[in-house]
Amino acid sequence: MDPIRFVTHQGQRILLLDFRETTPDQVAELSARVPEVITREPKGSVLVVADFSGVTFSRDAVERIKIATAIDRPHIKRAAWVLTENLPKALYDSIRSFSARDIPVFDTRDKAMDYLVS
């Protein structure tokens, strides 16, 4: 199953970025693919959840995430991340600052998706 795919939650379409248990190189590779998918959608229309449960981040992965979140910003209606205390706050803050986006963090995918559709 493609880790970048649309799913339905409570009748709403959400782009799921399923990074769970991937390597830092895979995170970087998948992050580079995300803008291709998101920028095909109308501006201000995409609900997106990124599930980073169990991920180890490299410097390259964080840089690719920063770039992706900045590129796709105009197309995002609302975003949420699932993190399990695996991304240091300083790196999370650098991503938020670079992308000029507020990305709330949740401890489960269900909570993140509930937030997106609320």
Image (tube, rainbow, N blue to C red):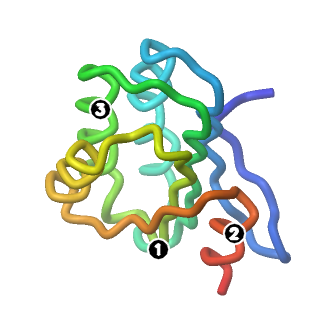
Foreground of the two, 89 or 35: 89
For the residue labelled by badge 1, is the local secondary structure a helix, a strand or a loop?
strand
Foreground of the two, 82 or 47: 82
Residue 13: x and y in percent read 72, 65
Query: Residue 43, relative to residue 117: is it above or below?
Result: above
Residue at left offset 53%, top offset 29%: 55
Residue type, numbered disc 1: Lys
Residue at left offset 56%, top offset 59%: 48
- Write down the residue under mark 2: 111
Residue type, numbered disc 3: Val
Residue 42: x and y in percent read 48, 66
Residue type, numbered disc 2: Lys
Q: Earlier in the sequence, mark 3 or mark 1?
A: 3
- Write down the residue under mark 3: 62
Gap between marks 2 and 1, in whole Å?
A: 17 Å
Gap between marks 3 and 1, in whole Å?
A: 22 Å
* In front: label 3 or label 1: 3
Quarter of the picture holding the C terminus: bottom right
- Residues at circles 2 and 1 in contact by the CB criterion of under 8 Å: no
Q: Earlier in the sequence, mark 2 or mark 1?
A: 1
Number of callouts: 3
Write down the quadrant of residue 49 in the picture: bottom right
- Write down the residue under mark 1: 77
For the residue labelled by badge 2, is the local secondary structure a helix, a strand or a loop?
helix
Foreground of the two, 85 or 111: 85
